[in-house]
Image (cartoon, rainbow, N blue to C red):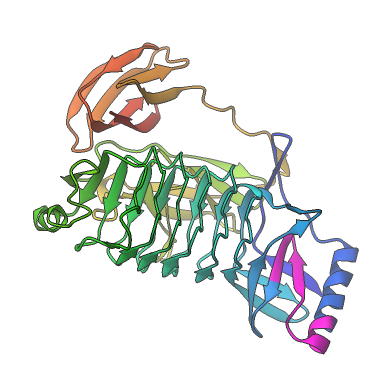
Amino acid sequence: MFSYRGTVLLYENGKHFRTKEPSLCTKLACVLMIMCCALHGHSQDIEANGIYYNIISDTQVAVAPAYYNGMNHYKGCIILPEKVYCDGVNYDVAAIAPRAFWRSGVTQVQIPNSVTMIGEAAFADAEDLTDITLPLGLTAVSNYMLAGTAITSVVLPEGIREIGTGAFEDCSYLQTMYLPYTLQTIGDRAFAFCSNLNEIYCDASNPPLTLDDNTFEGCNNIHVMLANESTTHRYQNDGVWGDEEMFSLWIDEGLAVLPSMQQENIGQSWTALALGNNMAYKIYAPDGYLTAITAADHYYLPIGAATTDYLVVPTTLMRDEEDLELVATTEPAAIEEIEPAPENELTILGLDGSIHVKGDTHGMWTFIYDVYGTLWYERPTTSNWISLPGPRVYIVKVGDTVRKVMID
């Protein structure tokens, strides 16, 4: 009677767990809810694998909040499914309701391409949220969608035309934004008080219209990477983007170094790709179709019945670095529960006008490039401070760890 497609990946007590089949009580509850829907219309929720849904049409559902006892109880890493099956109907997960994850404890969210609408404040004030992968069919970033989160890097897929009011307001950890060529308008206070926003990769040939003077309030010294010289001239002549105290304009010349990628099977259902480094990646399925574009630190691939290869291509939106492409392979696994890999204690930070490398760096070398690929520093690594000219964005490679660092 009741099943689901897709998985919600939960973390508990420092371990990874596969989610379990719904209990008999849950199955009976679903039957009762469907009966209520038949009597009173589509007003009741479906619960599947810890996620709640509102039925919004005969074939579609929207992810709904999980409020009880005054709290939103979603938490941890959540991979939303594309479909939910209940009482003979295979519902598409087509939307995320307003405030669905508001003030929740989610840390990572991966949204399927079946979702085409995300409601206002859907993730607002989810203070532990650091990673998100948005669906390819999204056309707008809703008002306050990610405001007050701990997100560090976000790529908006092609097709998004509008960023709503306060969409990223008070995202004080946000460092890197990737904006698509389709972007036309950016709303009031969309990036207000994103105090660590230091680089924007913008593929829009014309400067996106900012709807108010306080769109970037509380920000300063943002490096904007643009496609070519003619585009740069248009931005220079714009009343907002031409503000030299707020923005410095650069021509994008691609990535300087090969990003690192590690992968780890999480139970029997998923392979986790460790990407991140504030870089964006396009992920292609075996049939050659684009399946995701993400700047999240982790992306999760489903494990099928056969070995499958996915192509992972670093991108700046303006350029796909095909000569740096990586291959991720998923293989069937029989692991029920595994310990997570030890966290890398190595940290690379931009502090007080210098680059600070801290941690166990024995036997490692440090290479530092600017965004144009010029090598600025090359020598064996010690835990120390490295002074380089600023303000400038550098790409720092210590052993297998790659980080983008802004020096003021």
Q: Residue at x 47, y 22 (%)?
A: 346
Please state if 78 lies on the left or on the right of 175 as rendered.
Answer: right
Q: Quadrant of the C terminus?
A: top left
Q: Quadrant of the N terminus?
A: bottom right
Q: State whether residue 239 is above or below residue 24.
A: above
Q: Would residue 312 be visible to someone looking at this image?
A: no
Residue 88 placement: quadrant:
bottom right
Please state if 339 lies on the left or on the right of 370 as rendered.
Answer: right
Q: Is 41 colored magenta in this rendering? A: yes
Viewer-closest of 14 and 153: 153
Q: Would residue 6 be visible to someone looking at this image?
A: yes
Q: State whether residue 76 is above or below residue 50.
A: above
Viewer-closest of 330 and 164: 164
Q: Position of residue 355 (x, y in %)?
A: 33, 21
Q: Among all residues in the image, which is located at the extreme front?
A: 213
Q: Among all residues in the image, which is located at the extreme bottom?
A: 39
Q: Is 116 colored magenta in this rendering? A: no
Which segment is the magenta one? 36-53
Q: State whether residue 31 is above or below residue 128.
A: below
Q: Position of residue 386 (x, y in %)?
A: 29, 16
Residue 350 placement: quadrant:
top left
Q: Position of residue 54 (x, y in %)?
A: 69, 73
**How many marks are shown on the rendered structure?**
0
Viewer-closest of 303 and 11: 11
Q: Position of residue 151 (x, y in %)?
A: 49, 45
Q: Residue at x 37, y 66 (%)?
A: 162
Q: Residue at x 82, y 76 (%)?
A: 33
Q: State whether residue 109 is above or below residue 393.
A: below
